[in-house]
Amino acid sequence: MARHTLEQQRALYALQTIQGHVSDVDKDKRRYATLVRSLPSMVLQNGLGQALAYLLADARGDDRTPARRLYAELKQWLVGDVSDDRPEPAYDRGSELMEALMAGSRTDYQQAQLTSLALLGWMRKFADAYLPKGDS
């Protein structure tokens, strides 16, 4: 089996993640696509912590919302779970992402932000390819 580069692994994760939303109801699919397209600019303008806090607030405690699902997908890449072998975890496996962001070092935070932007770049490209545009 060929070894994949980190960029290939990110792209594959992003593709599988976006394809997992193709069968969502239209309203959720559109909202999710809008979030994926807008989150990189939120991260750049306000930082990763505030962008993730926005997703949590938008979800209003409902794990089924597009915002909460996007948060969970970013968390899976950045933290994963204890048995996961993601190539670039920013924090300890199984950590709660927001708590890890707030408690971690500045270097860890910056790395998580760069990693998120790289992943979101791929997610945005695949959202453009597979998901509808518009928020309604």
Image: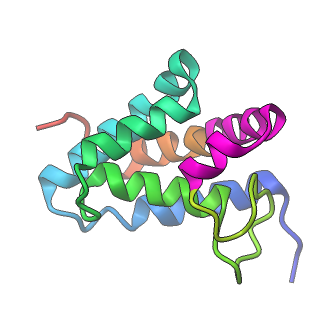
Please give left or right for residue 126 compared with residue 55 in the image: right
Which quadrant of the figure has residue 54? top left
| The one of 11 and 28 positioned closer to us in this rendering | 28
Rendered location of residue 23, percent (x, y):
25, 68
Q: Is residue 82 left or right of residue 59?
A: right
Counting every numbered tag in the picture gives 0
Q: Is residue 85 above or below residue 108?
A: below
Question: In the rendered view, would you say 89 is above or below 123?
Answer: below
Identify the residue at image location x=57%, y=25%. Answer: 47
* Horizontal arrangement in the rendering, residue 42 relative to residue 77 (left or right): left
Residue 31: which quarter of the image?
top left
Position of 19 relative to 31 (above/below): below
Q: Residue at x 33, y 62 (%)?
A: 21
Q: How is the image coloured?
A: rainbow
Q: Is residue 118 visible?
A: yes
Q: Position of residue 116 (x, y in %)?
A: 63, 42
Residue at the farthest top position: 45
Image spot of residue 106 (x, y percent): 78, 31
User: What kind of secondary structure does the magenta stretch mostly adopt?
Assistant: helix
Region of the chain picked out in magenta, as a range: 97-118
State the quadrant of the C terminus: top left
Rendered location of residue 123, percent (x, y) = 51, 47
Residue 131 in view of the camera:
no
Q: Quadrant of the N terminus?
A: bottom right
Q: What residue is drawn where x is 20% and y is 34%? A: 134
In this rendering, would 108 be left or right of 2? left
